[in-house]
Amino acid sequence: MEHEDKSESLQNLEKFHVSEEYGFVLPNPLTELPDYYAPWMDVAANLPHLIEGHQLRREVAKMPLLSTQYLRGHRQLRLARLALGFITMGYVWQGGSRQTVKILPRVLAVPYCTISELLDLPPILVYADCVLANWKKRDPCGPLNVENLDILFSFPGGDSNKGFFLVSLLVEAAAATGIKAIPMIINAILHHDRCSLETALQDVALSICKMREAFKLIHECVNPGAFFRSLRIYLSGWKDSFLMPEGLVYEGVWDSPKQFSGGSAAQSSTLQCFDVLLGIQHRAAQGFSAEYLGCMRDYMPAAHRAFIQTLASGPSLRQFVLATGDAGLHAAFNKCVLALVDLRSYHIQIATKYITIPAGRCRAEQQQLGGCVHEGTSVLSERGTGGTGFMRFLKAVRDTTRKAQLTEQ
Ligand code: HEM
Ligand SMILES: Nc1ccc(Cl)cc1-c1cn[nH]n1
C-alpha cells in the first residue's frame, strides 16, 4: 500500500482499537458476564482466598465444561479471557516453584483456547489482560486515578497486586496523548507541514514525561517483598522454563505440551509504538533475543499489533526530520528520544528496587536456611545467573534508545 494510503488508515484510530482518551487501554471494560459463566467468574473473583486455602485445584475439578457460544462481542471475550487467564496462572503456580502442574484441565483449557483463538492471543495471561482490561472506576463519573480505580481480579499478594496493575494502567493512560499525536505526525510528514509536525512531536515528548510521572506511584502502591515473593511468580510463563521444561499440556486441545512466555510490559504496545515512531531498533542482550521484543507483538491484541505494523511500514519520521535539516524539528525529535531514555532509566531503578535487591536478600536467606528462589521464566524474573540477564537487557534497550538521538548536522 502506498504511504498515502497508510497515513489515511492510521487516521482512523478506532479501527485499531486505539482510544483518543485511553490509548491502548480498553475503555470501560465489562465487569460481568451472563450468569451461565458464574463458575468461571466466582472462582476468578475468589482466587487469592482459594490459592491461600489450597482449595483452587478442588474448585477447578468441580467446574463444568462451559460452552463459549453465549459470549457476545469483544468486551465479553476480553473479560472471559481475563477470568480464565487469572485462574490458569493461579492453577499452574499455586504451589510456587516446588509443585508446578504439567496439565491444565479441559474445563479450563478448552474454553480458554477457544476464546484465545477468537482474539488471536496466546492461552496465557498477557499484559493486555491484567492491565488493559482489568480495571473499573469506583465512581464512573470520577477521574482516572488510583483513588477512583480498582482491579477486577487479583493474585495473592494483597494491595501490591492492585498497585502494580493500576500504576501500569496509569502509565498506559498517560501515553494516550502521545499515541493520539501519531496520525498527526504521519499526516504532517506526507504534507511537509513542519509546524504541525513540531507541535505533534512536543505532544509525544510531554506524554512520555507524564508516563514517567505516573510511574512514580509504584513506590507508594507496590511493596518490593510482596512483588518479588508473590505477584512476580504468578505472572511467570512456561517457555524456556526449567521449572516446566516441556511447557503446559492443554487437555482436550493439543496432545503435546505447549510453551508460552509470561506476562510482560514488553507486550505493551505503547513503548513498542514509540520505538517504531522514532526509528529505534533493539538488538539482542544476554538471555533476551533480538526477536524477544518482536515476539512479544504476538502477545498483543491483533488490532494493536496491526497499528504498530502499519506505523512501521509508513514514512520514516527520522529520515524526514534529517532531510529537512530543520533545527526546531531536530530538537523536538531528540526531546522525544531523551524522554524515552529517562523513562527507561527510571524503570531500571524500579527493577533494581523490586527484583535485584530482594533477590539478593533472598539468596542470603537461602544460604542460611536453604530453599530455592523461584527462578521463573521470562517476565520480571531472574534470568541467567544472579538475575543479571534482565538487567543487561533493560540497559541495552535504554542505551540503544539513547543512541537514537539525531546528532548535530
Ligand atoms: C515493580 C515494577 C516493575 C518491575 C520490577 C519491572 C521489571 C521489568 C523486567 C525485569 C523487565 C525485563 C523482563 C521482560 O520483559 O520479560 C521489564 C521489561 C519492561 N518493563 Fe517493567 N517492571 C516494572 C514495572 C513496569 C511498568 C509499570 C511499566 C510500564 C507500564 C514497565 C514497562 C516495561 C517495558 C516496556 C519493558 C520491556 C523493555 C523496554 O521496552 O524497556 N515496567 N520490566
Ligand atoms: N507492568 C506490568 C504489568 C503486568 C505485567 Cl503481566 C507485566 C508488567 C511488566 C512490567 N515490566 N515488565 N512487565
Image (cartoon, grey):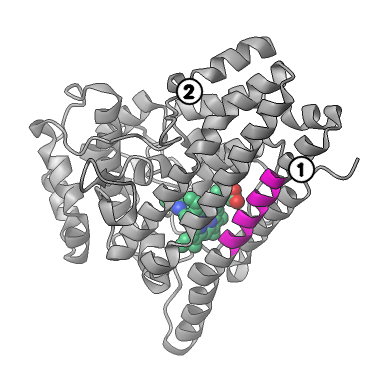
Residue 212 pos. (x, y %): 54, 55
**Residue position for label 1:** 331
Is there any visible trace of residue 95 in the rendered image?
A: no
Check residue 34 for magenta coloring.
no
Q: Residues within 10 Å of mark 1 (few under 14, many from 20)?
A: some
Camera-nearest residue between 135 and 117: 135
Please give the name of the residue rendered at 27% of the width and 65% of the height, measured from the top-left corner.
Answer: 158
Left-right relation of 91 to 283 = left
Asked where in the image residue 101 lies, by quadrant, the reply is bottom left
Element marked by disc 2:
helix
Please give the name of the residue rendered at 60% of the width and 22% of the height, measured from the top-left corner.
Answer: 310
Start and end of the magenta stretch?
Answer: 335-348
Q: Earlier in the sequence, mark 1 or mark 2?
A: 2
Identify the residue at the far front of this view.
195
Up the image or down, 262 lies above or below 53; here it is above
**Residue position for label 2:** 13
